[in-house]
Structure formats: structure tokens, C-alpha cells
Image: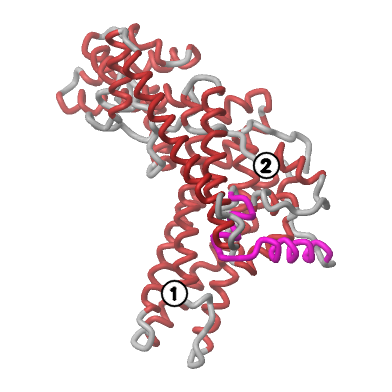
């Protein structure tokens, strides 16, 4: 295989990098990656018969030469032994599915076992096989109608009592938002272009750079309760201080409207808006304007600022957490959990930063080096970005755990200086990580997914 399969080696490397990035990504709803879906059985037949032609329809024309070359290499390798055939077949199937899904704008999340296909998809396949759509259409129509009717009646029932108290009013707002977003999402889905990109959600978002430009151009207009938290911070980064004060998540939870974020924290939305408006008038050095940077400059800034900080600070925090747990653990058993959570964060973030620096960020920088291919590159980075966002969510959950375990980073009266230094360091670490994730989730990633480059900008 070393001598006769250069394409096989190259795709093994690419596949390994992809698996490292995509492991743990939320499973897709389609079934082209399932053992009993339409593609994999056909690919197995092609490997057995030696004829790739029947399955080439599943990949883009531009990918045919490389897949065909790999097919020839695999055919030679699989003839060596039973074990070689099993490994080579698995590699080719995974590569074929990866290439198919990448061309459709979807990530490769592994091969699903037989029986993993949702019943409705099996019903859709059966309808196509039989050439009869009526039963499936009626089934889906009824399901959609039931979902809309349920949300409608829930919102209508709460709406009748919405003015009786603030609590009931907020319950109505939550139901109303759910009802409207469901209808809007269904409408957008039905009117979007066909393909896998639609099933994974549009890459554009209200926090994308195009929207943030609009928001920024109206930055001094009154802050609205329906503006997203991430969009507010993207337009005016200094306002992140206010969200930190109130414990409002503007990074992982940045796509949530301000009113909804306040409701989740039992905060008065008008009070928070007033505080945001007050912060606008404060003098002082402006925060980093991530939205004004090019993709390359922003990726460089994240590495040089936040990654450098984490690599220096995490070992110090780990050492202090270990010392405090060993000295005071009997007095407060939660300190062992603090130690373990800090250790988990350090391990996760170390791996996370490596994947960004070695794979994802170089791919993003290449988008600006070759702007004519930015749209194509955006498709290829969708999967890795989803995985990075998933890992951000995991880090956010660990941060919440630390906040709970330490009573909001408040030391007890008997805390020693090391204990107090640990809590102070953890609080600063949380603030930095919030900024770090915000710049990626709400600025860098949406713009990269949109294929947006700003060649020549600082």
C-alpha cells in the first residue's frame, strides 16, 4: 500500500484530520451515511463487482478523478488478504460518504449502523421504490399541521392571560416566540434550495457579518429587546462587560434574543437595556472590534491573545486547584470537583486549540488567500466549525459548573491566599473564554461559513 496507493495515503491523512475534528458532531438527519441507506449498499456492490460507474452519480463531477483513483488503489489492496479487504473497503466507503456530504455542504459524522434510519426516512424510501407518494404526503401533512396547531393553541391560551402579571406575560412571550420561529423556520426550509445544506440549517445567521455591519451602522440607535445578545456584542464589544455582570451568556448562547436571555436569568429586560445604554456612554479604551478585522487578522488575534493566555494560565490554575483541594478538600468536598473540572477544561481546550491552529484556522486563512474559491472553501469548513461550536458548548457547561461549585467565585471567610488567588484566576479565565468564544461563534465562524473575505483589510 505504501508503494502503490498515493491517493489512499493522502485520503487517509485527510480522513484522520476530519475524524479528529468531527468526532462528536451532532448526527445529521439524512441517511446517506447509513448502512441501510441508498449509497453504502451500492458502494459495496461496486467494490465487489469492480464497477464504480453506478455510484458516481452520488458525488460531484470535480471529485470523480480522485475517487476513481482511490477506487483503483483500494481494489488492488483488497486483493491482498481478507483483513486488507475489510480495512480498504471501510476506508473507501467512509471517504466516498465524506466526499458526497462535503459537496452537499454537510459534515461527515461516521457510518451509521443498519436500523439507524428514522422510520419516516424509511417510509420516504419505500414510497419512492413503489412510486406512490400519497400515504407519505398525508403522513407528513398531518404531522406538520399537528405541530403548528399545538404551538398555536399554547400561545393563544397564554395570550388570553398575558396582561394579568409579568410572569404570565413572559410565559406568553416564550410561547409566541416558539410559535413564530417554528412557522418561520418551516417556511424558510420549504423555500430554500434543495440539498443537504438545507437540512443542516442555513449558514447565514442574524449574527453573520452582513447583519453585524447593518447593526454597526445603527450602533447608537436604542437597543432593542429582540436583538440577539451576540449581535449586540459584535456591534459594540464593550457591552460584553454588562452581560458579564448579569451572567448572560453572549458567546455560546449568543443567538438568543435579549428578552429571552433576560427571561432565562429572571432579569428585567428594561433594567438590562438601561444598563447597556449607560455603558455606551462610559469613557475608556474601546474593546477589540473583531467584526472590523479580516478573517486572517481575527484568527491571528485569537491565537496570539486568547490561545497564548490559555497556555500560560491553565497550568497555573491546575496547580492551584490541586493544592487547594488537597489542603482544604475535607472542609469543602466541592474543591475536588473544582480541581477535576479545571483539569477537564485544560485537557479539552488544549486539544481544541490544536485543532483550530493546525486545521481550521489555516483553512480559513486560505479563503482570503484565494477569494475566488471562498464559497467552495466555506462548504468544506462547515463540519469542522460545527465541531468547534459543540466543543465551545462543552466548555461553557464546565464554566457554569465552576461558577456553581465556587458560589460565583466568592471565597469563604476562612479561605487562604492561594484559595482566593485561584478564584480570582478562574473568574478572569471565564471572562477571557467568553470573549474568546464570542469572537469565534458570533464573528469568525459565521463570516467564514458565508464565504466572506475582506482582502486588504487589517
Q: Position of residue 158 (x, y in %)?
A: 52, 51
Is residue 129 visible to the viewer in this orientation of the structure?
A: yes
What secondary structure is found at the residue carrying circle 2? Answer: helix
**Start and end of the magenta stretch?**
256-281
Quadrant in the picture for the N terminus = top left
Residue displayed at 53% across by 55% down: 171
- On screen, 32 above or below 435? above
Residue 212 in the figure: left or right of residue 93 = right
Residue displayed at 51% across by 67% down: 314
Is residue 2 visible to the viewer in this orientation of the structure?
A: no
The foreground one among 24 and 307 is 24
Q: Position of residue 138 (x, y in %)?
A: 36, 20
Picture quadrant where residue 161 is located? bottom right
Magenta stretch contains residue 268: yes
The disc placed on residue 405 is 1
The disc placed on residue 70 is none
Magenta stretch contains residue 160: no
Residue displayed at 78% across by 36% down: 456
Residue that numbered label 2 is attached to:
296
Quadrant in the picture for the C terminus = top right
Amino acid at each position: 500500500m505504501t508503494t502503490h496507493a498515493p491517493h489512499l495515503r493522502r485520503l487517509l491523512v485527510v480522513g484522520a484530520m476530519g475524524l479528529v475534528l468531527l468526532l462528536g458532531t451532532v448526527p445529521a438527519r439524512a441517511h446517506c451515511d447509513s448502512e441501510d441507506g441508498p449509497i453504502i449498499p451500492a458502494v459495496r456492490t461496486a467494490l465487489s463487482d469492480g464497477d464504480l460507474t453506478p455510484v458516481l452519480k452520488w458525488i460531484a463531477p470535480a471529485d470523480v478523478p480522485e475517487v476513481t483513483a482511490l477506487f483503483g488503489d483500494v481494489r488492488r489492496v483488497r486483493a491482498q488478504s481478507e483483513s486488507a479487504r475489510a480495512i480498504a473497503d471501510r476506508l473507501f466507503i467512509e471517504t466516498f460518504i465524506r466526499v458526497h456530504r462535503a459537496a452537499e455542504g454537510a459534515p461527515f459524522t461516521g457510518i451509521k449502523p443498519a436500523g439507524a434510519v428514522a422510520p419516516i426516512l424509511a417510509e420516504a424510501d419505500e414510497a419512492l421504490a413503489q412510486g406512490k407518494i400519497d400515504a407519505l404526503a398525508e403522513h407528513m401533512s398531518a404531522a406538520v399541521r399537528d405541530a403548528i396547531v399545538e404551538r398555536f393553541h399554547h400561545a393563544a391560551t397564554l395570550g388570553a392571560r398575558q396582561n394579568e402579571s409579568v410572569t404570565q406575560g413572559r410565559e406568553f412571550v416564550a410561547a409566541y416566540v416558539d410559535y413564530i420561529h417554528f412557522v418561520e423556520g418551516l417556511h424558510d426550509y420549504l423555500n430554500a434550495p434543495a440539498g443537504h445544506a438545507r437540512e443542516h440549517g442555513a449558514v447565514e445567521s442574524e449574527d453573520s457579518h452582513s447583519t453585524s455591519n447593518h447593526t454597526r451602522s445603527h450602533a447608537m440607535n436604542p437597543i432593542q429587546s429582540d436583538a440577539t445578545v451576540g449581535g449586540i456584542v459584535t456591534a459594540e464589544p464593550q457591552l460584553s462587560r454588562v452581560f458579564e455582570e448579569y451572567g448572560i451568556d453572549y458567546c455560546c448562547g449568543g443567538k438568543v434574543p435579549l428578552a429571552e436571555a433576560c427571561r432565562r436569568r429572571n432579569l428585567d429586560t428594561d433594567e438590562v437595556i438601561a444598563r447597556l445604554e449607560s455603558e455606551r456612554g462610559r469613557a475608556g479604551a474601546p474593546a477589540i472590534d473583531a467584526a472590523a478585522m479580516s478573517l486572517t487578522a481575527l484568527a491571528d488575534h485569537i491565537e496570539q491573545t486568547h490561545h497564548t493566555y490559555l497556555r500560560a494560565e491553565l497550568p497555573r490554575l491546575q496547580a492551584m486547584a490541586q493544592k487547594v483541594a488537597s489542603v482544604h478538600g475535607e472542609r469543602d468536598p466541592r474543591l475536588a470537583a473544582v480541581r477535576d473540572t479545571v483539569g477537564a477544561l485544560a485537557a479539552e481546550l488544549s486539544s481544541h486549540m490544536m485543532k483550530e491552529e493546525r486545521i481550521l484556522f489555516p483553512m480559513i486563512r486560505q479563503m482570503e488567500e484565494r477569494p475566488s474559491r471562498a464559497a467552495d472553501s466555506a462548504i468544506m469548513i462547515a463540519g469542522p466549525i460545527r465541531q468547534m461550536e459543540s466543543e465551545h458548548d462543552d466548555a461553557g457547561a464546565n464554566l457554569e459548573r465552576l461558577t456553581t461549585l465556587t458560589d460565583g467565585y466568592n471565597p469563604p471567610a476562612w479561605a487562604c491566599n492561594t484559595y482566593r488567588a485561584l478564584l480570582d484566576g478562574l473568574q478572569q479565565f471565564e471572562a477571557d473564554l467568553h470573549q474568546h468564544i464570542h469572537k469565534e461563534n458570533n464573528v469568525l465562524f459565521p463570516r467564514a461559513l458565508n464565504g466572506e473575505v475582506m482582502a486588504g483589510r487589517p
